[in-house]
Image (tube, rainbow, N blue to C red):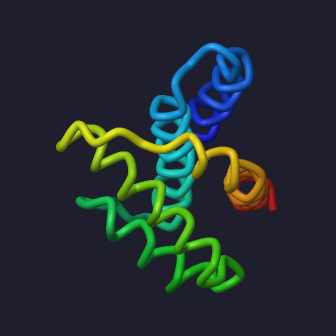
Amino acid sequence: MRDLAQKRLESIKRRRTTDDPEFIIEDYYEAAKELITALLFIKGYKSYSHECLITFLKEFYPEYGEADRSLIEQLRQIRNDLLYRGEPIASEFLNRREKDIEEVIKKLIKKTQEEIQP
């Protein structure tokens, strides 16, 4: 899962100037979801909903504070709005929050690495 997330992030960097922000945000969320899912697997759990991923982080990894969890939740909501309702996503959100998104994902990559190789 971690490798898949990293490939997705590399793809974002290659496409960043050509793709619509909707697809970039969707891929950022998918990368975060894959990394949290990897942490779930490491702990011996399986999630049946996206909401459980945020709860899992809160319960098992308190170092991901409210701001981190809220950002991941915003990505999930934006992704759902796009996929299920076709709502357009303002590029302003991506421009304003992309550095924060990348920081959270870097922390998740680091945490999965630490959990795999303590």
Q: Position of residue 12 (x, y in %)?
A: 65, 26
Does residue 84 appear to the left or right of 36 in the view shown? Answer: left
Point out the image quarter for the C terminus.
Answer: bottom right
* Residue placed most toward the observer, 6 or 13: 13
Quadrant housing residue 84: top left
Relative to 46, residue 63 above or below? below
The residue depicted at 55 percent of the width and 81 percent of the height is 60
Q: Is residue 3 above or below residue 28?
A: above
Residue at 47%, 29% (x, y): give it: 23
Q: Is residue 58 left or right of residue 17?
A: left
| Image location (x, y in percent) of residue 4 | 57, 30
Find the residue positioned furthest to the left: 85
- Location of residue 115 by image quarter: bottom right
Q: Position of residue 117 (x, y in %)?
A: 79, 54
Which image quarter: residue 67?
A: bottom right
Looking at the picture, tell me which residue is in the foreground, 117 or 94: 94
Q: With respect to residue 73, does 1 lie above or below?
A: above
Point 77% across, 56% down: residue:
103
Residue at horizontal 77 percent and vertical 52 percent from the top: 99
